[in-house]
């Protein structure tokens, strides 16, 4: 069986470059197609470590532990994973830890799978309820500024920030052969 | 070999009772005190509830991060710390309930194989903080085997406090990752409450490592 790897979009390479320039060493993830390029780039980089998770909340705890030890971490996940993180996000508030997560959105634009929609609709609210500021990048030319702002707010300002990468930005998932 | 599903399965658990199910189990306070005394260099993360109290009762240390919540998060938190501080031993001291909630974290640790990370589970087979309801480890789950099956090759069941020094030596050697399931008595011990201010715990921990505040 072969898997097709769609060509990376420039904004995806920009995210990788921003993480690297920000000194991020640990990149925790539950995979999503929208993060696939960054994950590949991280795994090929000797100064960064990709950490595959069994559930997204592990990445919240891991990011706090990395910070305790003097390293910067980010969490890559899909919107469905935000729900898995809710209680663990308490750790970040209780310890006043910096935190950045990049969230690829599902359930909001041309969604084929209705099971993605409930959590997709609740993603921003769930993060905000748990004290995570939410920014959104809806177009390719917004990505660099918004992700850069999130990294600065977290690692310079000590904030907890999520960037939602719109489903429209990522592009429609091809469910049926054309 | 193990005999899963048998009434007497050799796990050290009395499967028939709800109460004091561990006659002859290890004294948790004595075990943790000896373990931490023998690992002065270790960076320690404790799971919420009794393991945090045990570590505090053994003597407060700046390089201990006590969790008061984040159930299931002790191991992944310690993984991030271990990857950030590869030259120092990192030790998780947690309970069976906390470890069960974060069981997937064992697979995540195994995928990284951090040589300096050791996870010690104080297993009384019960949820001690909430009224001593039986946990999965007294209902058939064998945690050390779970850890081994996840890919943590050094995974032991500890049944005697006399094994504490060998465990401490293994932690210091940083030849892990390693896992130890310690069969403790389920008798209640007095609470010993560490600081609950997470930001304070974080800042003093980082200061002890020479890291600047934000």
Image (spheres, coloured by chain):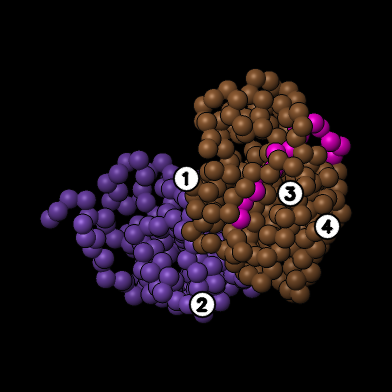
Mark 2 → mark 4, Cα distance in angstroms: 35 Å
The residue wearing badge 3 is B163
Q: Quadrant of residue A168?
A: bottom left
In the rendered image, residues at marks 2 and 3 fall on the same chain: no
CB under 8 Å between discs 2 and 3 = no
**Of the residues tagged 2 and 3, which is closer to the observer?**
3
Q: Closest to the observer: A75 or B81?
A: B81
Q: Secondary structure at mark 2?
A: loop
Q: Which residue is mark 4?
A: B37
Q: Are marks 2 and 4 on the same chain?
A: no
Image-based side of A142 in relation to B58, left or right: left
Query: Closer to the camera, B207 or B162?
Result: B162
Residue A165, percent from left and from top: 41, 61
In the image, residue B179 lies in the stretch drawn in magenta: yes
Q: Which mark is residue A122?
A: 1
Q: Which chain is brown?
A: B
């Amino acid at each position: 069986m072969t898997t097709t790897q769609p060509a990376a979009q420039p904004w995806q390479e920009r995210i990788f470059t921003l993480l690297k320039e920000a000194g991020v060493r640990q990149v925790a993830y539950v995979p999503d197609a929208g993060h696939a390029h960054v994950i590949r780039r991280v795994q090929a980089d000797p100064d960064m470590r990709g950490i595959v998770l069994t559930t997204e909340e592990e990445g919240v705890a891991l990011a706090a532990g990395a910070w305790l030890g003097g390293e910067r971490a980010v969490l890559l996940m899909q919107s469905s994973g935000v729900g898995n993180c809710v209680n663990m996000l308490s750790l970040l508030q209780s310890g006043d830890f910096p935190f950045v997560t990049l969230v690829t959105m599902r359930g909001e634009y041309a969604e084929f799978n209705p099971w993605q929609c409930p959590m997709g609709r609740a993603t921003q609210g769930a993060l905000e309820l748990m004290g995570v500021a939410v920014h959104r990048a809806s177009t390719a030319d917004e990505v660099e500024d918004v992700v850069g702002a999130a990294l600065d707010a977290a690692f310079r300002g000590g904030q907890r920030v999520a960037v939602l990468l719109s489903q429209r930005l990522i592009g429609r998932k091809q469910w049926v052969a054309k | 070999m193990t005999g899963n599903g048998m009434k007497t399965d050799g796990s050290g658990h009395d499967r028939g009772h709800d109460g004091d199910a561990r006659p002859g189990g290890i004294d948790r306070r004595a075990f943790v005190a000896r373990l931490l005394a023998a690992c002065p260099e270790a960076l320690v993360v404790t799971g919420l509830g009794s393991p945090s109290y045990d570590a505090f009762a053994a003597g407060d240390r700046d390089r201990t991060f006590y969790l008061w919540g984040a159930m299931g998060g002790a191991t992944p938190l310690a993984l991030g710390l271990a990857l950030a501080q590869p030259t120092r031993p990192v030790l998780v001291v947690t309970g069976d309930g906390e470890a069960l909630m974060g069981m997937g974290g064992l697979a995540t640790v195994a995928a990284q194989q951090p040589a300096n990370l050791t996870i010690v589970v104080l297993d009384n087979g019960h949820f001690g903080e909430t009224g001593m309801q039986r946990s999965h480890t007294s209902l058939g789950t064998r945690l050390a085997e779970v850890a081994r099956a996840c890919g943590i090759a050094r995974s032991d069941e500890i049944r005697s406090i006399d094994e504490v020094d060998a465990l401490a030596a293994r932690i210091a050697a940083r030849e892990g990752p390693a896992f130890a399931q310690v069969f403790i008595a389920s008798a209640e011990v007095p609470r010993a409450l560490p600081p609950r201010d997470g930001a304070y715990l974080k800042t003093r921990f980082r200061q002890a490592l020479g890291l600047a505040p934000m």
